Amino acid sequence: MFEQSFKNIDDILHKDAGCGSELDYVEQTSWVLFLKYLDDLEKDKENAAVLSGKKYTRIIEQKYKWTTWAAPKLEDGKIDHNALTGDDLLDFVNQELFPYLKKFKQDAVSANTIEYKIGEIFSELKNRIQSGYNLREVVSLIDQLRFRTHAEQLEMSHLYEGKIKNMGNAGRNGGEYYTPRPLIKTIVKVVAPKIGETIYDGAVGSAGFLVEAFDYLKNTKKLSTKDVETLQKKTFYGKEKKSLAYIIGIMNMILHGVEAPNIIHTNTLAENLADIQEKDRYNVVLANPPFGGKERAEVQQNFPIKTGETASLFLQHFIKILKAGGKAGVVIKNTFLSNTDNASIALRKELLTNCNLHTVLDLPGGTFTGAGVKTVVLFFTKGAPTKKVWFYQLNLDRNLGKTNPLNERDLAEFVALQKTKAESENSWSINLKDIDKNTFDLSAKNPNTPEEAPLRQPNEILENMAQLDKESSEILKTIKDLL
């Protein structure tokens, strides 16, 4: 039901003059979907209040309720065809609904409320659908969707993730919002966060790491009421610079069941590292910071190790913002392990001196569809220097790509071996005392790869050919004698 509805909505938006790409489709589907989801959420809270003999006051006023403007129903349950459409619908949405929802941000009692998030979402978004008749069709399709059961919410959230993934094929850097889910699940398993720990992603994008950590923690044990409240309000934190990614990150978490995500719209790298205090720190960092970007000189001034490479600045930020004993799983370009510039050497030294870099996962090319770079995942704990690093090189018998992506089975051996840091054909360890202390080079060179036969020298090949010719002549002479 959800999948076909999404396809039909994309077909409608494709015809609309205001929507030019998959990014626009996701953005516009998101706000309509969110308002329908919010209406269903309010109905559930209202019903729960009635059962417990309490009163529930709805967040959204009657005039702006989904069932008033989007899907007014007749007594037989069918949509009232006198509902707003065309220019009337556009005027209501653009001039009344959006300004009303935008005001929630300034009226909310705190940033940790769903009211505040409603205000933030509609402060950042605008309706791009230019035809009120197209908007009416989209609204009618979304009205048919239900989010009332856990299974429905799960299907909805997975399909929404699929739409985010498709953004990577739409240009405008959509792909940077998406890290393959099998990789995120694996990183979360290895870092193994616990309920009560705070989890942070300073380059949150579509909030994939926070969503997967939420799903992982929900399934670690039977949750008490206190556990549920902790996961809802005191566990997940993120920052995102780009408006669309920020909105989609919030939507993604809400659709997965976190009602008021603690995600802030800000440039993480604009924060001076010297200003980070103990109260600002987190127990767990999970992130795939953007790589390849170049930061301006004034941004670099916020960091002790000056570099224009965005990912290197983020790594400094993550080390600083971890609590002592805090754990991290961070994706970074594999060239970080061996770059010879002063900043890279200084950053490797910083990481190895102040943290225990216990595991490096070396990923094959094609892991990130369309990115064209090789990456590694750094797993480290803050507070004690590194003595030994365990490497695992993911060697697959196929090329990864859009039609043949990474899956969890590919990473199963890594997860199993990582627990004991066992040595295998794909894994090995290096002692820090054995590395060059001038460069701190950590190049992932697997000593257990079966050696290929060395190439033969030309004179050796010629000698071999002469020997074969001689043997052939002797065989032919023998056959001739026999005849």
Image: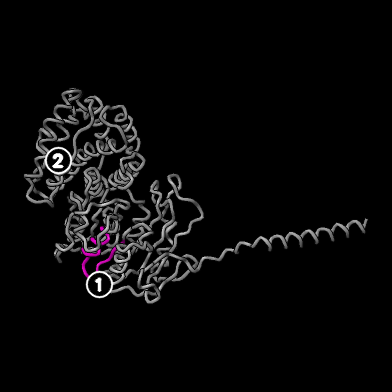
Residue 461 lies, with reference to residue 388, above or below; the image says above
Residue 271's tag is none
Q: On the image, which quarter does residue 384 sit in?
A: bottom left
* Residue 5 placement: quadrant: top left
Magenta range: 313-329
Mark 2 Cα-neighbour bin, 10 Å: few <14, some 14–19, many ≥20: some
Task: Judge whether residue 61 can be spotted in this image.
Answer: yes
Q: Is residue 277 magenta?
A: no
Residue lying furthest bottom: 433
**Label 2 amino acid?**
Ser
Residue assigned mark 2 = 123
Examine the structure image and report whether residue 319 is included in the region drawn in magenta.
Answer: yes
Query: Which label sits in the foreground, 2 or 1?
Result: 1
- Residue 34: image x %, image y %? 21, 40
Camera sees residue 225: no
Mark 2 → mark 1, Cα distance in angstroms:
41 Å
Precedes in sequence: disc 2 or disc 1: 2
Query: Which quadrant is home to the N terminus?
Result: top left
Type of amino acid under label 1: Gly
Tell me what residue is drawn at x 29 percent, y 63 percent: 328
Measured from the top left, where is residue 202 in percent x and y?
Answer: 23, 55
